[in-house]
Image: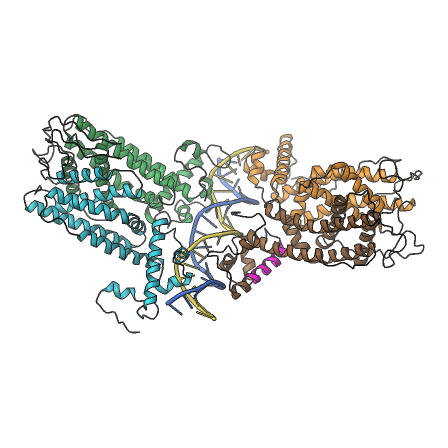
Chain colours: A brown, B orange, C cyan, D green, E blue, F yellow
Amino acid sequence: MEHTAGNGEETEAMRERRLDERPLTTRGRRTRNTLVQAAREMFEEKGFEETRVAEITARARLAHGTFYTYFDSKDDALHEVAKGLTAEMFEASRSGEPPGAAPVDRIRASTERFLSVYRDNARMMHVVEQVSPRNPRFAHVYLEIRGLFVDRIAAGVRRFQKEGEADPALDAETAASMLGGMVEHFARVWFLHGQEHDPDNALETATLLWARGIGLDVSGDGGTANATATVPEGESTARKG
Amino acid sequence: MEHTAGNGEETEAMRERRLDERPLTTRGRRTRNTLVQAAREMFEEKGFEETRVAEITARARLAHGTFYTYFDSKDDALHEVAKGLTAEMFEASRSGEPPGAAPVDRIRASTERFLSVYRDNARMMHVVEQVSPRNPRFAHVYLEIRGLFVDRIAAGVRRFQKEGEADPALDAETAASMLGGMVEHFARVWFLHGQEHDPDNALETATLLWARGIGLDVSGDGGTANATATVPEGESTARKG
Amino acid sequence: MEHTAGNGEETEAMRERRLDERPLTTRGRRTRNTLVQAAREMFEEKGFEETRVAEITARARLAHGTFYTYFDSKDDALHEVAKGLTAEMFEASRSGEPPGAAPVDRIRASTERFLSVYRDNARMMHVVEQVSPRNPRFAHVYLEIRGLFVDRIAAGVRRFQKEGEADPALDAETAASMLGGMVEHFARVWFLHGQEHDPDNALETATLLWARGIGLDVSGDGGTANATATVPEGESTARKG
Amino acid sequence: MEHTAGNGEETEAMRERRLDERPLTTRGRRTRNTLVQAAREMFEEKGFEETRVAEITARARLAHGTFYTYFDSKDDALHEVAKGLTAEMFEASRSGEPPGAAPVDRIRASTERFLSVYRDNARMMHVVEQVSPRNPRFAHVYLEIRGLFVDRIAAGVRRFQKEGEADPALDAETAASMLGGMVEHFARVWFLHGQEHDPDNALETATLLWARGIGLDVSGDGGTANATATVPEGESTARKG
DNA sequence: CATGAATGAGTGTTCATTCAT
DNA sequence: TATGAATGAACACTCATTCAT
């Protein structure tokens, strides 16, 4: 098992690394995609170590050897899957926010979006993390994806601070790391470990903790009638399954 | 032959199930402990999958075969290590809080304590999590340990709510899961992934986010002396089964 | 369909056996030559077993599959290369000797010629030998090439015997096998194993051992002032680098 | 396939390189020997590349995995076999000569001895040579063994020269390389390639070519009594860089 | 003819586990 | 108890060869 070049960069160059450097034909591209998809599915189902290369090719309805027409190793295939994961997460982290919305609504919106992507990618995230200690390449991937969101959050916090809505004394980076971690971790327990949660309650609670945590004023009604301490008779929408 | 140890705890009974069920001699106990310790060290260094049984015995300066005098399998050894981990975490989760302290101070204290234990056990926690998907036994261990803290936190939140200091509309369980996850996740990134953080800053930021998040009044000051200790003599109602 | 090439030589017929038996087009012949050349280069560089078909085609700048348009197998390609080798060696073994020259000079001349061809073909000879045990076809090739020279030498020895210059008691065939082997083996060590030798010294020493060995009188001056025991002040030209 | 330490030296240190460095038990030593022997037999029968590890263990009547209890790799096993080969050849190269015998008799005796050892070890020698190009470790082994004999021969030639029996002008090293090669090569063709030869004829012819080649006087008779040193006083001008 | 994707049998190596001593 | 040799199932990876286009 050699890690000839696994610094996580130069992805374009690396993709063309096969025997004779020639780019893939259409058919080749299709086969390759099939394999990446099959690999992802298997990894999600059984984890990386537990997945056999033969299982991947079986699922892709290809011969065992075909796997190595497209990947140098099982690790390499994971790397490929991870690239897709990163891309997807990147998209998600970029996706627009309601522009003129109130701070709390923005937080809620982005949290909702995050929970949504994470639900779909939780298993792969976990796989990547699992492999991290053995291969720094994947440690990097994890941190990179995490950074995508944390940076975004930090920027948001700073903006709120600038706008005078959030506590200016807060260290935005650290807070972002924590708030991002809060949602991510919750999502892990929810989607990965199977702990049951009511989506609305989860969303509202996260939003509330977050918003209040950074010092936003949520006393009025920053959101869709979300429970605040001042609401006298507010039926708590928070529930837990 | 005979089951001397019939103290009712299932796990205890299971521990003594090796060979012909005789309880361990003094020498045996010592050897066993050596192995458990060696196993833990190796797991922490290289992860569970990457650790060879031979490496464990080598570190313990014992013969390869001796391992199976005490454990049924590598999984079994991990289970043993995990039991120690659980015990340690249990202790930590119990360890007393400053009784009459102000809410924010209590939060800070418990956060500090958590970060401290977690620093020492982060790697093993990660190992347990890594193995979770393959063996529900370990999934359980992880969730159990996590529950230790989350329940504690939930109890705390509820108490604050009862005392009128925290937002009563908040779903204590969900909030606890999130706040606990926030600190845990932050600790992972810090201690496991090696991201650098200033301990004081981390502690204060976490405390602040947490306290404000649940609706405590931290307006007084951001730090040590805060949170109008109006709490009279609130008996902590937090308990765990 | 039709066997245009019916020139009676078995090997020729066999060479054209690919695909639907059509003789090669001009382009085909060129491609084929390119492949044979590339194969020879790769075999010389890495040996037969270590050479991949893909490496041959890569060097020939052709598609992997094209290889099998011209050869039935990797072995077949080696056979093709070996045919060229045999031809070259055949030429060398035939190449004229100085007609009226003195015996020692003839020996020197043929030894020099042999060393020269061998230098260029040592690696391929070695490859053929390497493969011999697995495939009798190549054992034959090796023995055949060797026979080319040994027979020539035997004929020479017999002629010297007939002319009364060499020891008539000598078994010409055995002596030829040994003398040929002597030079061949020396050449192997020199050109293949990289042991350093001074060309002049090598040539003179070989010539001397050979000539004297078969009983020629080298006391006078059989050669280009070559050192003999009787030469009192004879500057030995023998040197070794 | 790693060549962690393959410089051919430090053999003792290397032998103890297994997992935990402990020396082998008696049983272990026996098993190991069985494997080395089985490996040698298989290598001789089928060559190195063609031999499967499974075949070696099958012949040794051991489980497949046991092979790796004693060797790091197939290469490593060959190395072990090669060490035995070297030792045997070393012994042979040392084995005493008839002390007061006539030069020709000494040559005959040592040639006979060489042919005898070579007959028993020809196949392994060939295997080692086969593998040489891929692994310098084995190239070294071959050259080393060869050197054993060539050095011995060179010493003999020099002694004959000193005693005034052999041509002092001859470059002893080069001549030794050639004469040794002559016999070795002949032995290869004989024992390896299966060319038939009469042992007596072979021995006598080799002895004669050799003796006469270095200038011994064999005029008297073909054998025992010979070699009147007629060589006057020719200062050997032969040099070697 | 040329291409390059697809095939699948084959093989070295690993390592948890067993077992005789 | 402790030892360390023995076991063998399992698996990643290779590569000559085939084949559809």
Give the left or right position of residue B79, taking residue D220 as reference: right
> Is residue A158 located in the magenta-colored stretch of the structure?
no
User: What is the quadrant of the N terminus of chain B in the image?
Assistant: top right
* Nearer to us in this view, A215 or D5: A215
Identify the residue at image location x=12%, y=26%: D233
Identify the residue at image location x=28%, y=47%: C122
Q: Chief secondary structure of the magenta span?
A: helix
Outermost residue to the front: A162
User: What is the quadrant of the C terminus of chain B in the image?
Assistant: top right
How far across and how far down the image is residue A77, in percent?
56, 55
Give the left or right position of residue C27, taking residue D153 as reference: right
How far across and how far down the image is residue D240, in percent?
24, 32
Work out whether residue B48 can be spotted. yes
Judge whether A187 appears above or below F18 on screen. Answer: above
* Nearer to us in this view, A220 or A178: A220
Q: Which residues are magenta?
A: A32-49
Report the number of numbered marks: 0
> Is residue A33 located in the magenta-colored stretch of the structure?
yes
How far across and how far down the image is residue D123, in percent?
30, 44
Q: On the image, which quarter does residue B118 sit in?
A: top right
Give the left or right position of residue C36, taking residue B96 as reference: left
How far across and how far down the image is residue C21, in percent?
31, 70
Work out whether residue A241 can be spotted. no
Identify the residue at image location x=41%, y=31%: D12
Q: On the image, which quarter does residue C239 sit in?
A: top left
Give the left or right position of residue A114, taking residue C58 as reference: right
* Nearer to us in this view, D65 or B237: B237
